[in-house]
Image (cartoon, rainbow, N blue to C red):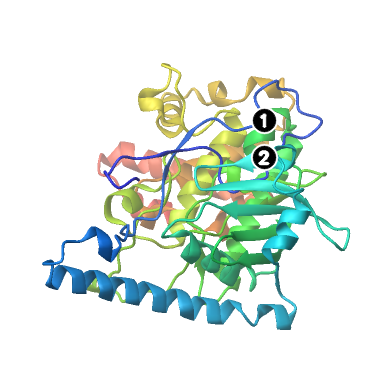
Amino acid sequence: MDNSGCILVKQIGASQCTPMNRSLSSHNSYAKDELHLPKALPMLATSRSLPTHAGTGLQKVKNTVQFLNTKIQKQFQQVAPLESKGTSRRFTEREIERATDKFSPLMVIGHSSHSIVYRANLKDGQVAAVKVLKITNLSREELLQEVDILSGLNHEHIVHLLGYCYSKDMQAVVYNLLQGSLKQNLKCLRWKERMNVAVGVAKALRYLHRSCSPPIIHRDVKSSNILLSHHFRPQLSDFGTAMVYHQPQKSLATREQHHVVGTFGYMAPEYVMYGKVNEKTDVYSYGVVLLELITGKAAIQKNMEFKHGSLVLWARSLLSHGLSEQLIDPNLNEDYNNEEMQRMMTAAQLCLRDSSSRRPSITKIIKLLEEPQYWVKVRKEREECNDEFKSSREPRIQRCED
């Protein structure tokens, strides 16, 4: 969102988006446009832009600047010791420039409205990806947030942080290099590979939600932020908008509301409308990714076939009319396991419930995808609930769907 309040159009996230060699599609190397909400913090004016008689207003701006600078300074103090611990390395501007061949256009493997991703040949011979942020009032905080969070994570399905560059003129994050994003390579994936992606991303979220204390909410789970290895193993990336989640008190009056960041088509209703965040925010976004894996379509469509351009609304319409087979990506050429397809469809439906309290945890979704017996149990409970609803004409959804 710019200073005038207009919503900016964002292309792919911080993904390394070079399509894989086995791609069957002839689409452009970069993803289609995504409507994206950046961090909703105020853009700060300098004192020169204020009239000398501003008085109290000028003091408020100075206080705000001082607060943000203090916050960033504290974040940097947290990040600075990482190199000595061996968890992250601080690169110089010259090292980044040399590794990217002076930021050669030939080394670009991805870009978005707020960053450019380069292939980089590091001095030790390692090949990496360097995400160079466009310097703004918010980029410093985003960089330090991402480095601070990623440096404490260790999971096979989360990108590995190699280092960062933090200076007045450059802000960059250095990752392990992968082969492209799910968004870029979706149509060429076979069904088995799509199932592996679904389970891998779910396990990454379970790690963030259950193994991290306090939990971490990603807030921007989407296909362009899911990177793939040579063997199509997924790794969740782009933690610039991630947040550490502190469990709120039960009182409604004390629930914290957060600035809305993320990508249209993936954001949960309660998050868009009220800024409410918990692990179910990620579960909803993950449900949209499941729909993409099933259909081979992007979350936002420009096709008139889609109501309001939403993949979620289109899929719900088909499912409500018993037309689930029309969801299946024709690029699969009917080469898929029917039971696994049904399990993934069920998981997507559960993740995309409008009420966050009715969405399952990501742990239950993993069971649903990996354990056929658990899926049979869930399906039986849903059928019994539907029969009870029809006979009594009074919904008892909460009891049946827990």
Query: Where does the image place residue 282, in percent across and percent down from the top left?
Result: 48, 54
| 237 in relation to 2, above or below | below
Mark 1: give few (<14), some (14-19) or many (20+) Cα within 10 Å: some
Which of these two is toward me, 138 or 283? Answer: 138
Tell which circle, 2 or 1, labels the residue nearer the N-terminal end: 2
Report whether 148 appears left or right of 334.
Answer: left
Question: How far is mark 2 from mark 1, CA to CA?
Answer: 7 Å
Query: Which residue sits furthest right?
Result: 125
Q: Quadrant of residue 133?
A: bottom right
Residue highlighted by disc 2:
17
Query: Which residue sits furthest top?
Result: 304
Query: Where does the image place residue 71, in percent across and percent down from the top left?
Result: 41, 76
Q: Split into 4 quadrants, where in the image is the N terminus? A: top left
Report the amino acid beneath label 1.
Ser
The count of marks equals 2
Query: Where does the image place residue 217, in percent across and percent down from the top left?
Result: 49, 63
Report whether 136 appears left or right of 395.
Answer: right
Query: Where does the image place residue 178, in percent across and percent down from the top left?
Result: 75, 48
Residue highlighted by disc 1:
29
Report the amino acid beneath label 2.
Cys
Q: Look at the numbered disc 1 and give the secondary structure of its residue.
A: loop
User: Badges 2 and 1: C-beta atoms under 8 Å apart?
Assistant: yes
Q: At 43% from the left edge and 27% from the top edge, which residue is drawn?
A: 314
Q: At 66% from the left edge and 34% from the top edge, which residue is drawn?
A: 184
Is residue 351 visible to us here?
yes
Mark 2: give few (<14), some (14-19) or many (20+) Cα within 10 Å: many
Q: Split into 4 quadrants, where in the image is the C terminus? A: bottom left
Which of these two is toward me, 48 or 386? Answer: 48
Report whether 399 appears left or right of 221.
Answer: left
Q: Look at the numbered disc 2 and give the secondary structure of its residue.
A: loop
Q: At 42% from the left edge and 63% from the top edge, which residue is drawn?
A: 278
Report whether 247 appears left or right of 285.
Answer: left
